[in-house]
Image (tube, rainbow, N blue to C red):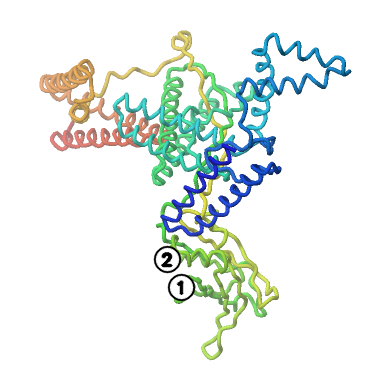
């Protein structure tokens, strides 16, 4: 009875709130539920059985146990007494004969306090068995766990004085509350839309590693080349995904792919260093990773729709192919009172014309009228054969492209049969429609990648001593290149002065002073040595230019365009200094 009264009061207050807010539909719905609970209370007071499964359960309330009957009108016994009654009911059928009925009473009277313990366990087991069977309860539990995870991450970010990150995590945690309320109410929740877990490390929860993929195949040069190419492909994929999620505003996934890109770049640099020093092949393996990517056409606006007429396929004709000149008209059914229309250019002499003509149309995503157009109407295409000046153009066929797939896809690309009324006219028309995001739900696609993971780089002393090693460079000898390096180093010191420690700042300043000393020393040697020293200096600089070009190519292949640009700048400074010397001393 108390449970019914509590739920009745809950729905009465919800009905009053809906009336105050002016939501008449919600108020009527809650009024019907209030009437159901009032009838159930009357039946319970009259001692009649009530089917509690038919009564709606308000959010945050547990379902009423199905075993409750009309006996609920009497006051409920305390938990210990209820457990003792349940124990008595269990013991009586085992007595067998009527003369043995006194034995349960003797077992009850000495220690009544022990009886609740064995009786309480079946009740707990029953509730535990019931909760996993409810999908809504499982979803609510997962949502609460994920919300607590983001709250804890926000607290940690706040302790580390990263307030922006803490605010972001709290906003995400707040977003779980309506989903939890919906799950508690028994409504379905799209679990694919919830933010990812922060404890998962780069999607490594489901990793498959094959033993044969850890074995080394081929000679040393081939293996290093293959590993280098795999790392370059991973860098490109991570960089493109990082840019994609950055445009979407998805900070978490953008940061994840940026971290993966940085890790692959470090592995690539270490791999090149190992190859140059003639180290053995590192230990590595491949993992099958699954990435969830949200598809979005970021080049389009929210209210833009791009309609592209790609090509015609085997258009029907009663004449020779060279005499078939075609063009296509379209009608877009929005706005309904002023439809957007257009016409393609004429393609001459082909039954497979390539139009490749895009049109950008205007839509209104938030308009109910546009939603009805998407559900009920389609884009109409008409293919015409262009005749002579004195004859009218002939209609070859029409096709209607439905807009309904745009509810779940941001790109719809398909070929459609041409029709002559209700008959097939022959031939097809290939059309592509693009919008920024699907109209109703996000388009999430999973891609599987074979991911290279380098476990350990190996260094051996024998390999370094037994094989010829390239000469170790002591730095550039070109004065203009040294001056350029010092300028870049001074800029770095000024930009990072507030973030560097005292030791790091001193180390960079000492390096800048060494570059200055090296320039002064080189200038003094050239003044003292005369033409012979200047001729040797020119030869050294000419030998350094190909080395800079090689390093620039390596950085370009690895995707590190900043370092590649630095090498190209060094080449320009070296060539500029050589030209100045040769212009000043032509006979050098």
Q: Quadrant of residue 338?
A: bottom left
Question: As displayed, is residue 158 above or below residue 1?
Answer: above
At mark 2, the secondary structure is strand
Quadrant (top left/top right/bottom left/bottom right) for the N terminus: top right
In the foreground, 546 or 235: 235
Q: What residue is shown with label 1?
A: 340
From the viewer's perspective, is residue 405 above or below residue 143?
A: below
* Label 1 element class: strand
Image quarter (top left, top right, bottom left or bottom right) of the C terminus: top left
**What x and y, as percent, mark residue 159?**
32, 24
* Viewer-nearest residue: 173 or 584: 173
* Residue 324 x/y as whole percent: 59, 77
Residue at image x 51%, y 88%?
389
Residue 69 location in percent, x, y?
Answer: 69, 38
Residue 426: x percent and y percent?
Answer: 68, 72
Q: How many marks?
A: 2
- Location of residue 171 with respect to 107 vertically, above or below: below
Left of 349 or right of it: where is 420? right
- The answer to whether residue 535 shows anywhere in this view is no
Q: Quick one: label 1 or label 2, which is nearer the N terminus?
A: 1
- Look at the numbered discs 1 and 2 and tell me whether their residues touch, using CB distance below 8 Å: yes
Residue located at (23% from left, 33% from top): 574
Residue beneath disc 2: 362
Q: Which mark is residue 49?
A: none
Quadrant of the image occupied by residue 361:
bottom left
- Between 67 and 460, the one nearer to me in the picture: 67
Q: Is residue 112 visible to us here?
A: yes
């Amino acid at each position: 009875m108390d449970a019914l009264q509590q739920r009745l009061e809950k729905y009465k207050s919800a009905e009053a709130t809906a009336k105050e807010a002016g939501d008449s539909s919600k108020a009527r719905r809650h009024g019907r539920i209030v009437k159901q609970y009032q009838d159930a209370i009357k039946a319970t007071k009259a001692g009649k059985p009530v089917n509690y499964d038919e009564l709606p359960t308000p959010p945050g309330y547990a379902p009423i146990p199905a075993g409750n009957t009309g006996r609920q009108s009497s006051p409920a016994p305390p938990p210990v007494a209820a457990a003792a009654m349940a124990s008595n009911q269990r013991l009586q059928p085992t007595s067998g004969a009527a003369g043995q009925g006194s034995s349960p009473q003797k077992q009850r009277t000495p220690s009544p306090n022990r009886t609740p313990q064995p009786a309480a366990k079946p009740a707990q087991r029953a509730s535990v068995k019931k909760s996993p069977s409810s999908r809504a309860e499982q979803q609510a539990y997962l949502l609460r766990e994920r919300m607590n995870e983001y709250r804890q991450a926000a607290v940690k970010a706040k302790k580390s004085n990263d307030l922006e990150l803490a605010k972001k995590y709290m906003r995400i945690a707040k977003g779980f509350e309506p989903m939890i309320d919906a799950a508690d109410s028994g409504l379905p929740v799209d679990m694919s839309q919830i933010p990812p877990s922060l404890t998962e490390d780069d999607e490594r929860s489901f990793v498959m590693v094959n033993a044969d993929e850890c074995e080394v195949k081929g000679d040393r040069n081939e293996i290093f080349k293959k590993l280098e190419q795999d790392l370059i492909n991973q860098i490109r994929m991570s960089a493109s995904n990082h840019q994609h999620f950055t445009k979407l505003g998805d900070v978490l996934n953008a940061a994840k792919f940026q971290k993966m890109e940085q890790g692959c770049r470090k592995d690539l640099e270490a791999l090149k260093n190992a190859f140059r020093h003639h180290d053995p092949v590192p230990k590595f393996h491949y993992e099958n990773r699954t990435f969830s990517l949200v598809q979005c056409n970021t080049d389009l606006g929210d209210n833009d729709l791009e309609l592209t007429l790609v090509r015609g396929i085997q258009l029907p004709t009663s004449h020779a192919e060279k005499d078939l000149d075609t063009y296509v008209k379209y009608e877009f059914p929005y706005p309904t009172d002023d439809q957007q229309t257009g016409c393609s250019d004429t393609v001459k002499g082909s039954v497979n014309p390539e139009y490749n003509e895009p049109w950008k149309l205007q839509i209104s995503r938030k308009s109910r009228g546009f939603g009805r157009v998407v559900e009920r109407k389609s884009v109409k295409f008409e293919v015409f054969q262009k005749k002579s000046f004195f004859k009218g153009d002939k209609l070859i066929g029409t096709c209607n492209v439905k807009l309904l797939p745009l509810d779940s896809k941001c790109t719809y690309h398909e070929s459609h049969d041409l029709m002559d009324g209700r008959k097939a006219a022959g031939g097809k028309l290939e059309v592509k429609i693009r919008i920024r995001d699907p109209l109703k739900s996000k388009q999430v696609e999973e891609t599987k990648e074979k991911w290279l993971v380098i476990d350990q780089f190996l260094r051996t002393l024998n390999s370094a001593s037994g094989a010829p090693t390239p000469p170790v460079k002591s730095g550039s000898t070109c004065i203009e290149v040294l001056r350029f390096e010092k300028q870049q180093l001074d800029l770095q010191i000024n930009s990072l002065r507030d973030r560097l420690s005292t030791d790091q700042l001193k180390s960079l300043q000492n390096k800048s002073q060494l570059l200055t000393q090296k320039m002064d020393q080189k200038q003094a040697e050239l003044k003292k040595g005369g033409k012979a020293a200047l001729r040797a200096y020119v030869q050294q600089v000419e030998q350094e230019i190909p080395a800079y070009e090689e390093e620039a190519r390596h950085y370009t292949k690895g995707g590190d365009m900043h370092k590649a640009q630095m090498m190209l700048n060094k080449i320009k400074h070296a060539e500029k200094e050589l030209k100045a010397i040769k212009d000043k001393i032509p006979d050098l």
